[in-house]
Amino acid sequence: MNAEISLNELLSIFLKRIWFIVFFTIISAVLGFLISNYVIPPQYISSTTLYVQGNDKQGSNDKQSLTDLQYRERIINTYVVILSSDDFLSMVTDQIGLDYTPTKIKQMTTIKGIPNTEVFEIKVKNADPIHAQIIAQKIAELAPEEISRVVNSGKVEVISTAKIPTKPASPNIPKNTAISLMLGFVLSLLLAYLLSLFDATVKASEELTKRYNLPVLGTIPDFDVKSRGAK
């Protein structure tokens, strides 16, 4: 049996099931849109930025061995660790008056430095836009005092206050729909190919010869049963 398949045969397989491929692809895209729009809950992001104030006395020995960029990155990383600590987040939890644990706030909060700057950003992602703003703003309000307490001469200044987001950050409905469409198209091609492999029906003598490498000795004529019964 010849297991090889040519490109023309592959195209022929897909063309025979073109309506199945189109239907499956469209259904996949529609499902992706519906799930993204009605099933996946929207998430909102509120953010605020803080500026790291320089201090010549702080880490003078370190500055001699580190470049300015390395020093800024190390200081910002230190501040990120401080603001991500359980003790600090417990203080945030106590003051916001919302039903969140420190662990939950840590999961929804991202704190990271902005490359090549002395600024770091606090982002809070939440299904409730108001809650996202409250948490982000409270972290920014408490951050200067906490950093100053832990790092004696550490100082930060709030650049921008957190605002209530008006549009969800996720899910990305157009992107999810496009991904669903592409996945549906690929899966439909695969299914069409698999269906052809399990289809043992022989529709022409040439196909029988090609499939089993055996000569065809004869064929049975296709009698018109309806016309015979009418006589």
Image (spheres, rainbow, N blue to C red):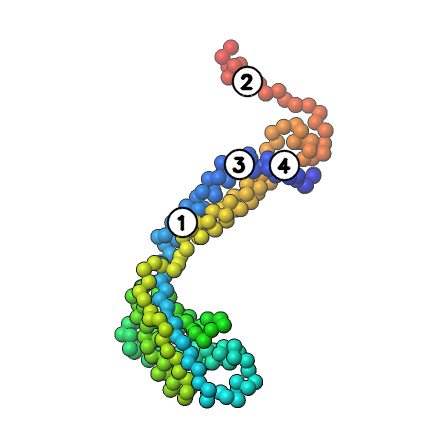
Residue at 44% x, 44% y is 27
Q: Nearer the viewer, mark 2 or mark 1?
A: 1
Please state which of residues 152 and 123 is positioned toward the viewer in this rendering. Answer: 152
Q: Secondary structure at mark 1?
A: helix
Badge 4, how many Cα within 10 Å: few under 14, some, many 20+? few
**Could you tell me which secondary element the residue under label 2 belongs to?**
loop
Q: Which residue is mark 2?
A: 224
Residue 125 visible in the picture: yes
Q: Which residue is mark 1?
A: 33
Distance CA(mark 3)–CA(mark 2): 28 Å
Reading the chain from its start, which is encountered first: label 3 or label 2? 3
Q: Residue at x 41, y 46 (%)?
A: 30
For marks 4 and 3, the one nearer the N-term is: 4
- Is the N terminus in the top left, top right, bottom left or bottom right quadrant? top right
Q: Between marks 4 and 3, how big is the CA–CA gap?
A: 13 Å
Residue at 38% in and 85% down: 148
Q: Which mark is residue 9?
A: 4
Which quadrant of the structure image shows residue 49? Answer: bottom left
Mark 2 / mark 1, whichever is N-terminal: 1
Circle 2 Cα neighbour tier, 10 Å, few/some/many (<14 / 14–19 / ≥20): few
